[in-house]
Image: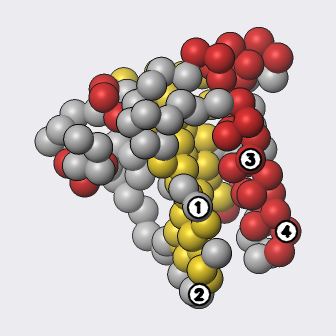
Amino acid sequence: MRATPASIQYSGFSIQNVDFRIEKNLGRIFRACNIFEYKSETDSLSVSDYDKVLAYGLLYSVFMKVPKSDMTLSFAYTKHPRELLKYLEGERKFAVDDQGGGIYYIRGEVFPVQLVERNKLSKEDNLFLKMLGT
């Protein structure tokens, strides 16, 4: 784990603090503190992965004294997470709102959450994220 005043990085995710509004499709949901989990093209996004990042967010909020209302979670993946969506909509009773272009918002979680399906993103608007894959 590496910590600086502006960010913390651990394993496959990072926490970024921003003090400006981002209008691009991926950044519309962002608030002051944003946790971003990036899955490789061969990894799937499981319920355990989701819960782990949610737990990190809760711990970060407590230890860094960041209000939950100032935080977001984002998950970028390639393989469509059918089991996770079934869990979120079925067991957790959350709404999954398709924002178009591979971005989905999860409504009802403690933080605003977005799921980002990389293979559905427009290359023009998301070149930096598309280039992380092959």
Mark 1 or 3, closer to the camera: 1
Residue positioned most to the front: 42
Q: Which residue is mark 1?
A: 11
Residue plotted at (74% across, 47% down) = 52
Earlier residue among tags 2 and 1: 2
Q: Does residue 66 lie above or below 100 as drawn?
A: below
Tell me if 95 is positioned left or right of 129 in this view: right
Residue plotted at (73% across, 36% down) = 48
Earlier residue among tags 4 and 2: 2
Earlier residue among tags 3 and 4: 3
Tell me which amino acid carries mark 3: Lys
Tell me which amino acid carries mark 4: Val
Earlier residue among tags 2 and 3: 2
Where residue 96 sits, quadrant-wise, is top right
Are the residues tagged 4 and 2 within 8 Å (C-beta)? Answer: no
Q: Does residue 34 lie above or below 77 as drawn?
A: below
